[in-house]
Amino acid sequence: MISSFLYNIGIYIYTFFVHLLFPFSRKPRKMVKGHLIVYELLRQQKEEGAKYIWFHAASLGEFEQGRPLIERIREKYPQYKILLTFFSPSGYEVRRNYRGADIICYLPMDKPRNVHKFLNIIQPSMAFFIKYEFWKNYLDELHKRHIPTYSVSSIFRRDQVFFKWYGGAYRNVLQDFDQLFVQNETSKRFLSKIGVHNVTVVGDTRFDRVVQIMHAAKDLPLVDLFKDKRITMVAGSSWQPDEDLFIPYFNEHPEIKLIIAPHVIDENHLVEIIGKLKRPYVRYSRATDENVKHADCLIIDCFGLLSSIYRYADFAYIGGGFGAGIHNTLEAAVYSIPVLFGPKFQHFIEAKELIEDKGGISIQNYDEFKRSVDSFLVDKCNLSQMGKNAGNYVRRNCGATERIMDAVDSHLED
């Protein structure tokens, strides 16, 4: 009781600060506005008599992780409607028109009154929470209502609150799930130590997603013309510290071409990148069949192309490893190319495993970057073998979606 009280106080305090920031920050402003229309949106869009399966994702990354499961259920059980909720504007604003769901909205704050109102309107037949979503009041109420509820692609580490002496309230929340579909055996062992046994190791649905993306990759004739059968590095989701490594190398090695898809695409950053280049470049938005042939660097100044561009790479550099953490390595590795990234990858199990499988390399500085890329240019067999290792790693870890489907089929067929 005390833990529930403290949790609810925390939710109210968080809500207060979101509203406090409303006039000053775009993200809280979008969130508050989205919350104001949630119930009306649900009432208007909900089909009377329809059965809904509810998927909740914190943000865009978690949505992409759950997407293969959403689409597999929609394909196999078209009699169900899909409700998709987001916590963050960075997920909702990008996927608000996603055609794989029938209703898309923000998740109201986890207050008891909101929870009852939300669930009374939608009355889901089943609920899926992607990865790190553990909202106590929602999960407690779903459990009370005997609505099958699952955690998808969750992963647990020793430093999480569930395993601390003060984490009792959070540990209890885990018992609300009918099943936790975790990524690895380590997660299962940690959960077993705190008495949570409703756990199945299925792997990570992100592997299934990147294979989906690969099969749907766009042909990009301008990129093909640019590459012109020369060794090409794609730098994906790069930040300034990353660019300070690979651009100097590129400037000194005319035998390679470079495609840069920066994480932040604004004019200031693009001008900063251009200022560092000493070889001919062209921006994708200004590329033509003619000028792209004479460029050595192609700067991607628009969104939505990176996952398709990796198909043209001989090796990839994944940004973020000198900041908060690396971006998506699997989007590149699925094309059977080696991936390089900075030192901050410890919370990304796929990066660790790519290194172990000799499909990925973590670099600490320019000298290590140079040594790695030099080896690719000198030894094409090494480049090819590392690429095969990366691709095999991705394919070996596919199948989580079907393993989850096998476990929930009986409930969906009722």
Image (spheres, grey):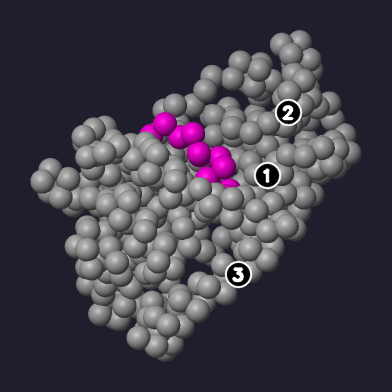
Disc 1/disc 3 C-alpha distance (Å): 31 Å
**Disc 2 vs disc 3: Cβ atoms closer than 8 Å?**
no
Percent coordinates x, y for residue 100 in the rendering = 38, 34
The residue that mark 2 highlights is 298
- First to last magenta residue range: 89-100
Question: Where the N terminus falls, by quadrant?
Answer: bottom left
**SS class, disc 2:** strand
- Asked if residue 39 is positioned above or below residue 149 in the image, the reply reads above
Q: Give me the residue at 60% from left, 40% from top.
A: 316
Percent coordinates x, y for residue 226 in the rendering = 69, 20
Q: Give me the residue at 54% from left, 19% from top.
A: 219
Percent coordinates x, y for residue 312 in the rendering = 58, 27
Q: Amino acid at mark 1?
A: His
Label whose residue precedes the other's in the sequence (2 or 3): 3
142 or 320, nearer to the observer: 142
**SS class, disc 1:** loop
Label whose residue precedes the other's in the sequence (2 or 1): 1
Disc 2/disc 1 C-alpha distance (Å): 15 Å
Q: Amino acid at mark 2?
A: Leu
In the image, which disc is placed on residue 16?
A: 3
Label whose residue precedes the other's in the sequence (1 or 3): 3
In the image, which disc is placed on residue 263?
A: 1
Q: Amino acid at mark 3?
A: Phe
